[in-house]
Amino acid sequence: MKKNMTSKERVMNALNGLPVDRTPVSNPTSVATVELMDLVGAPFPDACRNPELNAQLAATGYTELGFDSIAPYFSIIQESSALGCEMQWEQKDNWPTVRMSNPIWKSINDIQIPPNFLDHPDNLAIINSIKILKRQFGNEVAIIGKTMGPWTLAYHVFGVETFLLLSIDDPKMTMECLIKLKEISNLFGQAQIDAGADILTYPDHATGDLVSGEYYKKFLLEIHQEAAEELNVPLILHICGHTLDRLDYISENNMAAFHFDSRNDPLKAMEIANNRIKLVGNINNPVTLYSKNTEDVKIEVEKCLEAGVQLIAPECAIPLATKLENLLEIPKTVKEWTIRNNG
């Protein structure tokens, strides 16, 4: 076991299967809260759209919470805004969303990347925030960018119901749409890498609530393998919901890790992954972190550690009213568990 690693070294080693001084505590999605927004004067929606405020809020995951990574992309809608989707930006106690009742595209022929896509203010907010964070922290902490996968983008630009019906009625056309949409994922992902991102979260919401595990193999496995080859940093796939039925396929996608939901038992997930892909997770958000106490958080963190989960994290973007003491308990428990088990 190595000693006295930086946070970045700890995260990068864990993702690459190398020795670590302790299990890293990471946040592949978001640990922003209203309390942290107030602390640094960076509220939603401004912190989603202004690079300086974005960087200030993102940094608190490391400076205030003690996590080993910083994730400046808090939501899942920056690309969709830049593509022209109708947005609802909300206020500091609500997440910004895409208004999918009025989709911008109807067919594959509508898919196009605007010439100013990367220069759109909502994309620049993330790209420039990463540059700020890289200047501020250098190689001290892992900076995790995020680029939406094609399945998620399809929901936003076509509408969830429309796209799911297309996947049933015309699988060939569905695949062609996903291949074209992946160009958007790669373009925004590469821009973040160029800005200084060490890792990319790759959310692609083919969830167990909406599609079968076979859908992942049929539509996304090969696309994700290509993304892992084309984007030259470790990728962390994120899919919410029940995913044990598709984890065997996910484990073959050549990405570095899978960020998984609390609805999946960590020990079972580790058995299925079988060292083919690292796991990140899976502390429950809506119940444990939001409404329970630190002892409950400790129990879940230790369950993940005992299972061998390689990076400990909340299962997804946390509720904005989450109590800071529950978030602080995550790295505290990891450190205490490490001392107790390694002397």
Image (cartoon, grey):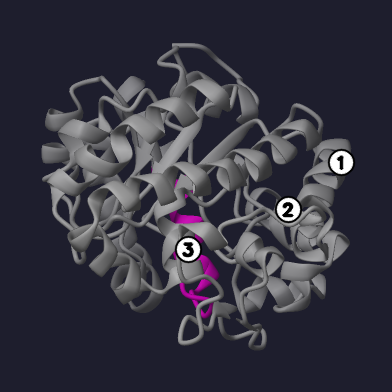
Q: Position of residue 161 (x, y in %)?
A: 30, 75
Q: Position of residue 331 (x, y in %)?
A: 48, 46
Q: Residue at x 28, y 47 (%)?
A: 172
Which residue is labeled 3 in the image?
A: 317
Horizontal side of 35 relative to 328 (left or right) equals: right
Q: Are marks 2 and 3 in contact (CB under 8 Å)?
A: no
**Nearer to us: label 2 or label 3:** 3
Q: Is residue 128 visible?
A: yes
Question: Which amino acid lies under the numbered mark 2 shown in the image of this protein?
Answer: Ala
Which residue is labeled 2 in the image?
A: 59
Crowd tier of the residue under label 3, counting other residues whose Cα lies within 10 Å: few below 14, some 14–19, many 20 or above:
some
The answer for how far apart the CA atoms under marks 1 and 2 are is 9 Å
Q: Earlier in the sequence, mark 3 or mark 1?
A: 1
Q: Is residue 27 visible?
A: no
For the residue labelled by badge 2, is the local secondary structure a helix, a strand or a loop?
helix
Q: Are marks 1 and 2 in contact (CB under 8 Å)?
A: yes
Q: On residue 136, which mark appears?
A: 1
Figure check: 185 above or below 295: above
Q: Earlier in the sequence, mark 2 or mark 3?
A: 2
For the residue labelled by badge 3, is the local secondary structure a helix, a strand or a loop?
loop
What stretch of residues is rendered in magenta?
Answer: 319-333
Question: Which amino acid lies under the numbered mark 1 shown in the image of this protein?
Answer: Gln
The answer for how far apart the CA atoms under marks 3 and 1 are is 24 Å
Check residue 251 for magenta coloring. Answer: no
Q: Are marks 3 and 1 in contact (CB under 8 Å)?
A: no
